[in-house]
Image (cartoon, rainbow, N blue to C red):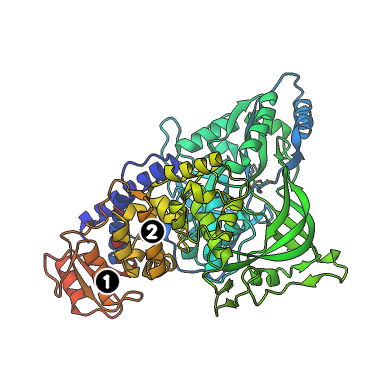
């Protein structure tokens, strides 16, 4: 083999490891995502052409590997311990007293405190700086080996960085928590829902389910994250305290929670507990308390552990986000797409400081799967600003009087027929003029992430629609102070204020505009991606499904939904009426999505699985590239599908890079 190729592969690996660390751990990238993708792509192509160069610590393992039959188990010499649990200040104060007594000291001692993330505990083993094994906690002593899966997580370094003043330990056993952020949990569940798959009850279950996939390629699609919170054996790291050890681990490239508060005295621990409790809802991930650890390793050793728990640490939990109550009734709410959502009316219950009297039941299948009946005692969960949900029925509390729920055959608002299409889990009202749908669409349009129109809340929208002053979001921009006088309790002053608030929001950023339209499956995140990928609205309107799908972060469901939205006359009419009403879209600085392949020439050979040849051609041309019929030295890429012809051989001979279908898609999609 050409030694230059080996060199190139090694350089790419080193660079990719470095950029990965800068991006995911330091949050300070040096190169664009597209440059990163190109390097990764080049590495994948080289590794597939020269399999003898394969290596288990190559950054390309992030994309996953073929499925396992079952997980191996591992028995560890140093078990992963659990923690003593307490609630509130008092339990920490008695812990502090126990610790001091155990140490025989009267003075204050130093603790390190950190959030207790509600995820899945794992052990990572690094030998001479290379990740060799990852396992779940299991019963503490015996866990399951999930190495291939953990390697797909971008924040897990495959190789550690050398730290100047410390030698790399031969063996380093690390402990940490793998989790899914709240927002990624929500997107995962809406994706599961749109594919008719079962929902996950909470981010922790979703993280556990994603980590325990026999096919690591599935894990690689789940945006798992990690925070490392300790070492299995404190001898292996040159540090005298927990906080110092975490600092060293951080310098080795491991991700340590930035909210760790090192070396604090008991008073500050109490302040920290309240501080983190206050932040709880606004943190991007779920936590259920804080963990407080005696900082000094020699103190930890003096205190020791029982067979299950260290005596030098305690978890102090926050109020539970889950409580039990009773379902008084189940009603049905109609959303902006006509989706009829069953909602449980509950006996009000206080969950972490908020009174909850309604909880979503998602859809008919969920009600049946969880066997939820009217009159049941249930567990209800609330996390941050998400809608409370019924998690589980307490079947042992039934008395026989509970009534099963039936999805109504008619829309409860307009009495039109309700249908549930084959293969979908959602029942919908079929009347596009249904006032409930119109109201929900307008509520969404005026909501915070979209047009954010001050004062235009639910009650006012209901009145405006009921009095037929508006029948679409576009009508809002044609309202006058005079017409508003018809409303209840609307004096000239408030009418004026509302008109001013509407006027204020006429200049709107592209992504808010797109989000506000309420295109199915286009949430705030997708709207931002689209606004970055297109120069303007008319360019987006003209783009076809496969071109949309080629954009990083836009899947087939979203792409199809956008195409359908813009193909409908009524939607185009509403957009025109918005513009006529004075709405001006403010575009982001344009990015050169269009021309990213300009000057590049492609040859297609064989059959692609998910794209026809003409779709592939549209994609290439849409991005400024050319497609030609035969391979020459001037060809930049050959795209090879199933049963390729002699063009593939020609490419190999001439040294033209060959892309498979997914590499091709990755290339046409990177968004710079
Ligand atoms: S320390 C010997 N620190 O909580 C100390 N645990 O019951 C062992 N957890 O399953 C744990 N965040 O996965 C520690 N910052 C943190 C943590 C943490 C979450 C989990 C851990 C374990 C459970 C303890």
Nearest to the observer: residue 618 or residue 342: 342
Looking at the image, residue 610 lies above or below residue 155: below
At x 59% / y 31%, what residue is drawn? Answer: 261
How many numbered marks appear? 2
Splitting the image into 4 quarters, where does residue 97 fall? top right
Query: Residue 378, percent across and down?
Result: 77, 60
For ligand 1, which image quadrant applies?
Answer: top right
* First in residue order: circle 1 vs circle 2: 2
Left or right of residue 73, residue 433 in this image: left
The residue that label 1 is drawn on is 616
Query: Residue 512, percent across and down?
Result: 42, 50
Left or right of residue 499, residue 648 in this image: left
The residue that label 2 is drawn on is 577
Looking at the image, residue 569 lies above or below residue 220: below
At x 28% / y 64%, what residue is drawn? Answer: 50
The label nearer to you, 1 versus 2, is 2
Splitting the image into 4 quarters, where does residue 29 fall? top left
At x 76% / y 19%, what residue is drawn? Answer: 106
Looking at the image, residue 629 lies above or below residue 471: below
Query: Residue 55, percent across and down?
Result: 38, 57
């Amino acid at each position: 083999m050409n030694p230059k190729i080996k060199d190139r592969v090694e350089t790419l690996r080193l660079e990719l490891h470095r950029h990965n660390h800068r991006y995911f751990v330091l949050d300070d990238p040096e190169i664009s995502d597209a440059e990163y993708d190109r390097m990764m792509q080049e590495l994948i192509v080289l590794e597939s052409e020269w399999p003898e160069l394969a290596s288990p610590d190559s950054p390309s393992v992030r994309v996953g590997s073929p499925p396992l039959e079952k997980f191996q188990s591992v028995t560890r010499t140093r078990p992963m311990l659990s923690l003593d649990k307490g609630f509130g200040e008092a339990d920490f104060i008695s812990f502090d007293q126990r610790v001091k007594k155990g140490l025989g000291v009267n003075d204050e001692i130093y603790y390190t405190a950190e959030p207790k993330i509600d995820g899945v505990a794992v052990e990572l083993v690094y030998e001479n700086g290379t990740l060799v094994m990852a396992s779940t906690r299991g019963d503490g002593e015996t866990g399951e080996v999930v190495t291939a899966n953990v390697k797909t997580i971008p924040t897990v370094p495959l190789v550690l960085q050398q730290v100047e003043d410390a030698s790399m330990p031969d063996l380093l056993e690390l402990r940490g928590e793998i989790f899914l952020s709240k927002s990624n949990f929500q997107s995962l569940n809406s994706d599961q829902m749109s594919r008719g798959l079962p929902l996950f009850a909470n981010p922790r279950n979703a993280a556990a389910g994603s980590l325990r996939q026999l096919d690591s390629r599935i894990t690689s699609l789940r945006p798992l994250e990690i925070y490392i919170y300790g070492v299995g054996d404190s001898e292996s790291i040159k540090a005298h305290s927990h906080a110092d050890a975490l600092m060293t681990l951080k310098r080795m490239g491991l991700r340590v929670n930035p909210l760790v508060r090192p070396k604090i005295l008991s008073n500050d621990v109490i302040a920290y507990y309240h501080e983190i409790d206050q932040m709880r809802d606004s943190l991007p991930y779920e936590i259920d308390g804080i963990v407080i650890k005696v900082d000094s390793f020699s103190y930890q050793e003096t205190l020791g552990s029982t067979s299950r728990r260290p005596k030098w640490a305690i978890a102090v939990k926050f109020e539970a986000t889950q409580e039990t109550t009773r379902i008084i009734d189940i009603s049905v709410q109609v959303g902006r797409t006509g989706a009829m959502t069953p909602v449980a009316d509950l006996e009000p219950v206080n969950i972490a400081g908020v009174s909850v009297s309604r909880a979503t039941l998602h859809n008919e299948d969920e009600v049946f799967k969880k066997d939820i009946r009217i009159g049941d005692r249930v567990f209800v969960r609330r996390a941050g600003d998400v809608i409370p949900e019924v998690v589980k029925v307490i079947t042992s509390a039934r008395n026989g009087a509970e009534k099963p729920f039936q999805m109504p055959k008619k829309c409860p608002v307009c009495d039109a027929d309700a249908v549930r299409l084959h293969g979908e889990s959602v029942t919908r009202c079929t009347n596009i003029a249904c006032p409930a749908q119109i109201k929900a669409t307008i509520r969404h349009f005026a909501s915070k992430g979209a047009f954010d129109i001050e004062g235009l809340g639910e009650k006012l929208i209901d009145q405006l629609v009921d009095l037929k002053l508006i029948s679409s979001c576009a009508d809002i921009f044609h309202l006058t102070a005079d017409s508003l006088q018809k409303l209840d309790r609307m004096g000239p002053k408030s009418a004026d204020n509302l008109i001013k608030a509407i006027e204020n929001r006429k200049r709107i950023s592209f992504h808010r505009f797109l989000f506000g339209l309420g295109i199915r499956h286009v949430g705030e995140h997708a709207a931002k991606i689209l606004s970055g990928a297109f120069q303007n609205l008319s360019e987006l309107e003209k783009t076809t499904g496969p071109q949309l799908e080629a954009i990083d972060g836009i899947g087939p469901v979203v792409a199809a939904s956008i195409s359908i939205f813009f193909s409908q006359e009524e939607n185009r009419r509403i957009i025109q009426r918005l513009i006529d009403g004075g709405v001006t879209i403010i575009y982001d600085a344009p990015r050169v999505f269009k021309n990213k392949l300009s000057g590049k020439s492609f040859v297609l050979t064989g059959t692609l699985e998910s794209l026809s040849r003409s779709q592939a051609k549209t994609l290439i041309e849409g991005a400024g590239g050319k497609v030609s019929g035969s391979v020459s030295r001037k060809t930049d890429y050959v795209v090879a599908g199933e049963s390729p012809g002699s063009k593939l051989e020609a490419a190999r001979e001439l040294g033209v890079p060959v892309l498979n279908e997914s590499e091709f898609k990755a290339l046409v999609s990177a968004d710079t």
